[in-house]
Structure formats: C-alpha cells, structure tokens
Image (cartoon, rainbow, N blue to C red):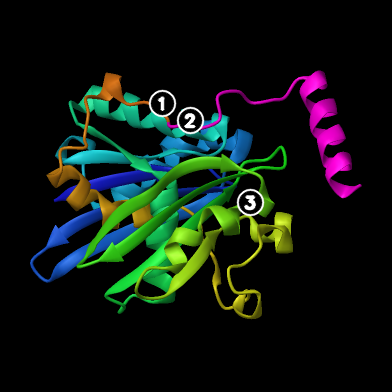
C-alpha cells in the first residue's frame, strides 16, 4: 500500500508518504511552518516528497488529510490540495479526525508498547476555547467515547472525567498547554505534569491510522471530502465578546 498524508490544521505543516515493503513500511516525511505560506509551499513539498520516495502520484492508493477540527484556513488548504491531487489522479480521499491523530501521536511517542490507554486530545481553538475529544486504545484499535467538542479550557478536566475511570493510563495531549496552562485543569493535580503530552496531528500519525480507516470504508470521492470545523464561525460579534466578558466578571465576583 502506498499512501500520502497532509496536515496543515495547526501551526505546523506536516506531509508524509508511506510505502509498504516486504520488510516493513517505509515512511518519508516533511515538516514545516503552516499558516499563510502553506498554500504556496504545500504542493511543491508534496511533489518533492513523492520524488524522494520514488512514488508517482497515480501509484498511490489514497490521499489522507487532517480534516479537523483546527485552523479554518489550514483545514481548507489541506482539503483543497488533497482533493485537487486526488481528482487529477483518480484517487480516493481519506478525511482523518485531527484529534484522533493527536491521540495516536501521543500514544506512539509516549508509550508505543502499551496495549491499552486513554487520551483526551486538546487543540487550541483560539478565542479562549479548545477543541477536545477522548479516545481509548485497546487491541490495536481506537474508539471514541467522547466525540469532539468546543470547550472553555477550564471545562476540559471535568468534561473528560469519563476517561479517568477506564483501565490503563490516561493522558491529556495536544498543543494547548503553553496558551492555557493550569486552566486546563487536571483530574489528578499532583500528577498534572506527568499526564500532559505535547502532541500535534502529524502526517505520520495519519498514515498509521489510515489502513484501518480505509478498511472500514472511510475513504470518499475527492469531491465529497470536507473539513470538520466543530466551531461554526470564525469570530465572535462585539456583543458576544461583551457578554462573555460580563459573564466572566460575574463568575469572579
């Protein structure tokens, strides 16, 4: 199986190509800065990576992309590039939950030998909010008891309390720690540092998730691929910001 994965939904641009070989799967990857520059640098970087892997675009089995939630612009960029490349080559597109990719990256880096664990993935959603979802890993597969939600940072620990009741270790993983710090809370304050794992939805994580998702029929035609926003608008109105400020002040009174 030959796969390409793209993620530009956070502060990082991540691309990877995997090729299954007789002695295992080989992966070529590229990391860079996302943001405004990603729309102009992404396609050349993809083509360069395919060249390094000696894989033609038409030889791929599918193109995976980080579908979100995440940066509105970044998600649209990854989706549009995946669609464009797939449409021209007649390939299926695999939208992958970005929070699931965070959980997978945290598991793979932090404890790859564990047979069971739970991860609450948290990505900075800006506007004093985070995207969060809880995933549990067992028997080589992930399941999602708490689907993606848009939360205030201080609500994450209480919202994710379910995961603390499961067997195996639990981590909070993502990119929101520097911005929100202790506001994210902890189910066990004494173990807060140990339970926090910095992680992003890397393209390599998308590739590890792709085979099982493809087997489940999650791939779609290029024109059917869509980002997963969770938040339905990018900015609050002046009245909404004023109401939020008043609510916060009342809570501190």
Q: Nearer the viewer, residue 175 or 117?
A: 117
Choose top left, top right, bottom left or bottom right for residue 110.
Answer: bottom left
Residue shown at 25%/23% (left/top)? 87
Residue shown at 18%/51% (left/top)? 212
- Residue to which mark 3 is pinned: 155
The earlier-in-sequence mark between 2 and 3 is 2
| 10 Å crowding of disc 3: few (<14), some (14-19), many (20+) | some
Considering every residue shown, the one lying at the far right of the view is 253
- Residue to which mark 2 is pinned: 77
Give the structural element (helix, strand or loop) at label 3.
Answer: helix
Q: Magenta segment, which residues?
A: 228-253
Give the structural element (helix, strand or loop) at label 1.
Answer: helix
Q: In this view, does 194 lie above or below 252?
A: below
- Residue to which mark 1 is pinned: 80
Q: Is residue 229 above or below residue 216?
A: above
The earlier-in-sequence mark between 1 and 3 is 1
Q: How many labels does the image show?
A: 3
Considering every residue shown, the one lying at the far left of the view is 22
Q: Residue 250 in the image: x percent, y percent?
A: 87, 40
């Amino acid at each position: 199986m030959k796969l390409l994965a793209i993620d530009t939904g956070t502060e990082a641009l991540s691309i990877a190509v995997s090729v299954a070989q007789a002695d295992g799967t080989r992966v070529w990857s590229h990391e860079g800065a996302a943001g405004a520059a990603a729309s102009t640098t992404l396609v050349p970087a993809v083509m360069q990576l395919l060249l390094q892997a000696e894989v033609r675009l038409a030889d791929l089995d599918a193109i995976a992309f980080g579908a979100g939630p995440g940066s509105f612009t970044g998600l649209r960029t990854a989706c549009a590039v995946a669609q464009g490349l797939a449409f021209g080559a007649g390939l299926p597109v695999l939208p992958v939950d970005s929070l699931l990719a965070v959980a997978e990256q945290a598991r793979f880096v932090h404890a790859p030998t564990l047979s069971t664990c739970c991860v609450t993935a948290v990505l900075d959603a800006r506007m004093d909010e985070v995207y969060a979802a809880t995933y549990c890993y067992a028997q080589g597969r992930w399941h999602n008891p708490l689907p993606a939600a848009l939360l205030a940072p201080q609500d994450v620990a209480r919202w994710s309390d379910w995961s603390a009741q499961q067997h195996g270790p639990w981590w909070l993983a993502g990119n929101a720690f520097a911005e929100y710090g202790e506001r994210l809370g902890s189910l066990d304050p004494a173990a807060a540092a140990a339970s926090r794992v910095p992680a992003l939805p890397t393209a390599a994580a998308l590739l590890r998730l792709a085979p099982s998702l493809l087997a489940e029929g999650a791939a779609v035609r290029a024109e059917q691929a869509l980002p997963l926003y969770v938040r339905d608008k990018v900015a609050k109105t002046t009245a909404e910001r004023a109401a939020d400020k008043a609510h916060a002040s009342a809570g501190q009174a």
